[in-house]
Amino acid sequence: MFTRLVKTSITIFFERVTMNRIVVGIDISKHKFDAAYRVVDQKWQRATFDNSLQGFKNLIKWFAEKQIKKCHIVMEATGRYGEDLANFLYVSGHDISVVNPAQIKYYGRSLLKRAKTDKIDSQLIAEFAQRHEISEWKPLSPGLQSLKDQTRCLEAFKRDATQTSNRLEHAKDYAVRKMLKERLEHIQKQIKQLTLSLKKLAKEEPLVAHKIELLMSIPGIGETTALSLLGELPELSTFKCAKQLAAFAGLNPSIKTSGISVKGKEAISKTGRKELRKILFFPAMSVMRGSSPIKLFVERLRGKGKKGKVIVTAVMRKMLHVVFGVLKTQTPFQGAA
C-alpha cells in the first residue's frame, strides 16, 4: 500500500512538472514550419515561420516576445527538413527532442483526432511531449555530419545511375541514347569522386575512423557497410538501450494476439528508418552463410523451427544490438552471441 502511494505521488509530481514546463511542438516541412505551445490553463500560442535561417531567427524573436528564455522543443524525425533547425536551436541553448513520426500518428489516433493540418500537428506534438518522457537530442560531430551528408548524396547518385541506366536500356532514339550515355558517365564519375572522398574522410577524421574500426570488428560488416551505417545512425546518446535503436529502425517485433481467437503472424513493425533495414539485410545474409560467433545465434533460431525471413530479420536486429553495444561502450566485438 505504501509503495503504491509513493509511486502515485511520484507520477503526479512528474505530470505537474511536465505540464508546467514550456514545451513547443514543431511540425516542419520543406518550405515552412509551424510552432505551438500552451502554458497551463491558457490558450494555445501558434506561429508559422519559413524553413530558412531567417525563419529560425524569427522563431527566436517570437520566443523573446513571449518572454521564453529556454524551452523544450520537440519535432518529428523528418530527416533533412528538420536537421538545420534542430542544430540552430541546440546552439541557441534550448532542449531538443526528435520523435518518431509514427508515435505522433498513433497518439493522434488514440485521441480520435479527425482533422490533420500543420497547426494541429504542431499542437499534437507538444501535447505528446507533455505527457511522455522523451530523450533529448544531440547533434552529430562535424565529421559525422559530413559523413552523413556524403553518404546520402552517394546513395542519391546511385539511384540516379540506376534510373538513367534503365532509361538507356529502353531508349530507341539516337539523340536520346547519346544524352543518356553522357549523363550516366557523368553520374558514374561523381560516384567515384564521392566514394574516394568518403574513404579519405574515414581515414583522416579520427572519430569517424575509430567508429568504422569498431563496426568492422562485427562479423558481416565491411568498410562500405560501416560507412553507410554511420551515415544513417543518429546520435546514440538519445537512446537508453539497444531495443530503442531497434524500434527506431523498425526492427522491433509486432505481435498481434487477442484472447484465443486472434493470433496474428509475428512480424517486424517497420515503423522506423527503412534505410537502416536496407543496409543490414545483406550483412545479415552473409553472417547466416558464413562462420562467425553470430552463427550460433542463427543455429539456435533454426533449432526452434524458425525459417527464412524470420531468421534474417532476427539476425538484422541482433546485429543492430551489437552495433549499439560496440559504439556505446567503444569496445570492439568480442564474439558473444
Image (spheres, grey):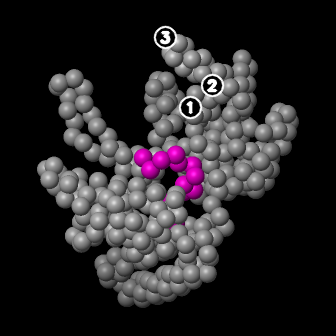
Residue 76: image quadrant is top right
Could you tell me residue 179's position as x and y percent? 45, 85
Q: Is residue 263 magenta?
A: no
Q: How many marks?
A: 3
User: Compared to 90, does 176 lie above or below?
Assistant: below
Amino acid at circle 2: Phe
Crowding around mark 3 (Cα neighbors within 10 Å: few <14, some 14 to 19, many 20+) is few
Spatial CA span between label 1 and label 3: 26 Å
- Extent of the magenta region: 230-243
User: Is the C-beta separation of discs 2 and 3 under 8 Å?
Assistant: no
Amino acid at circle 3: Met
Amino acid at circle 1: His
Discs 2/3, front: 3
User: Is the C-beta separation of discs 1 and 3 under 8 Å?
Assistant: no
From the viewer's perspective, tell me whether residue 245 is left or right of residue 19.
Answer: left
Which residue in the structure is indicated by mark 2? 14
User: Compared to 325, does 204 lie above or below?
Assistant: below
Crowding around mark 2 (Cα neighbors within 10 Å: few <14, some 14 to 19, many 20+) is some
Residue 132 is labelled as: 1
Q: Earlier in the sequence, mark 2 or mark 1?
A: 2
Q: Earlier in the sequence, mark 2 or mark 3?
A: 3
Q: Earlier in the sequence, mark 1 or mark 3?
A: 3
Give the secondary structure at mark 2: helix
User: Compared to 229, does 173 lie above or below?
Assistant: below
